[in-house]
Image (spheres, coloured by chain):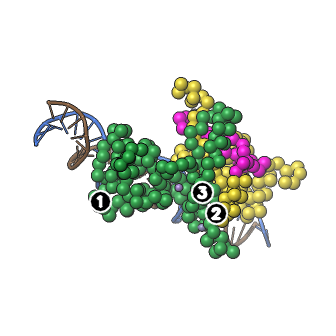
Chain colours: A yellow, B green, C blue, D brown
DNA sequence: AAGGAATTTGCAAACCATTCTCATTGGCAT
DNA sequence: ATGCCAATGAGAATGGTTTGCAAATTCCTT
């Protein structure tokens, strides 16, 4: 990561390095994510947010851009089981975080933990399956729902 | 689990206890799963299999039955990211198993491990989120794909 | 055994997030 | 500035899943 480069510029370079053109649509979508860390945005969410700054944008372009940004590792694509994919900015620090999904209100919170790196090694040794990545979700009730249910 | 009761009869009782009617369609679907442990069947898979024994069955009925059986805990519904839900018989014996999904050929294998029960407790203590269940998937390359890629 | 209310079924149409088609626009290397 | 080709926007298409509805069936009550 070069000095004096904003996260924005850094990712723009990354796009160029992958020979993707730097269109205003892509820049706007990128800026939107930089303004929304810690949120899990759906394509529709992004579309709405971007439309304020760029009313002519098409939903298909949003989908295409999210795809690209996930492909080059800028975004992480999640499936929380609500029928749509949700994207978040990839954390710069490297260890994984897991998601806690409330079965009642659908809220998603996070939990940091890198315990699973060792489990990956165990699996590869035991089964021969070469693990590249993992995805861990917990389902249950968030604190506020616990209160309302009691 | 009462003596002398087959797994089939046992589940039929479970359906009755939840005041679901015991239709021949549901019985046929259930028998199909009892003949296909260790497989992850999609609704379409089940539809095809059941159609041999029960040609008049409708796809919607399959979906509705899978929903019910998952609801009463007989089946486990999985999402392996291939755009359709996949169901498997809920293991009667022990704990959770995790899925190893090959990014190249899409094959799904399994890994038994109950390490995560303790992690659930840790999460509840640390965050207050009341964990009921979890879902852990590993992505990578299966052994045969590793060979073909080298 | 028969009656009847409530479920369940099969079919087709609807749903809905995502992808695709294609004519037009625009980024960027030269 | 020029030209090639990727990228865009609009709308149509896709495909797994759900839903509306009339007819059939389960199963509880007599
Ligand atoms: Mn997250
Ligand atoms: Mn399994
Ligand atoms: Zn909640
Ligand atoms: Zn494979």
User: Are discs 3 and 2 less than 8 Å apart at CB?
Assistant: yes
The residue tagged 1 is B54
Q: Quadrant of the N terminus of chain A?
A: bottom right
Q: Nearer the viewer, mark 3 or mark 1?
A: 3
Q: Residues within 10 Å of mark 1 (few under 14, many from 20)?
A: some
Q: Residue at x 63, y 69 (%)?
A: B143
Please provide percent x and percent y for residue A144.
Answer: 60, 28
Asked whether residue A110 is drawn in magenta, I would say: yes
Of residue A91 and residue A20, the one placed in the foreground of this image is A91
Mark 2 lies on residue: A127
Residue at 63% x, 40% y is B120
Distance from Cα at disc 3 to Cα at disc 2: 8 Å
Quadrant of res A141: top right
Residue A59 visible, this orientation: no
Q: Is any atom of residue B132 visible in this view?
A: yes
**Disc number lying in front (2 or 1):** 2
Name the residue beneath numbered marker 3.
B111
Residue sitting nearer the eye, A16 or A94: A94
The chain containing the residue under callout 1 comes to B
Q: Residues within 10 Å of mark 3 (few under 14, many from 20)?
A: some
Q: Is mark 2 within 8 Å of ligand 4?
A: no
Give the residues in magenta: A89-116
Q: Is residue B34 magenta?
A: no
How far across and down, in percent of the image, does residue B23 sit?
29, 48
Q: Secondary structure at mark 1?
A: loop
């Amino acid at each position: 990561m070069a000095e004096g480069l904003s996260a924005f510029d850094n990712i723009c370079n990354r796009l160029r390095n992958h020979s993707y053109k730097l269109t205003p649509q892509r820049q706007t979508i990128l800026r939107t994510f930089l303004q929304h860390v810690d949120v899990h945005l759906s394509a529709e969410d992004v579309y709405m947010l971007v439309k304020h700054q760029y009313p002519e944008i098409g939903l298909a372009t949003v989908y295409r851009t999210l795809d690209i940004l996930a492909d080059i590792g800028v975004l992480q694509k999640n499936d929380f089981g609500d029928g749509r994919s949700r994207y978040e900015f990839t954390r710069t620090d490297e260890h994984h975080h897991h998601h806690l999904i409330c079965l009642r209100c659908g809220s998603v919170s996070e939990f940091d933990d890198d315990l699973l790196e060792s489990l990956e090694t165990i699996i590869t040794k035991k089964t021969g399956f070469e693990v590249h990545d993992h995805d861990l979700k917990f389902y249950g009730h968030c604190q506020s729902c616990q209160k309302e249910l009691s």
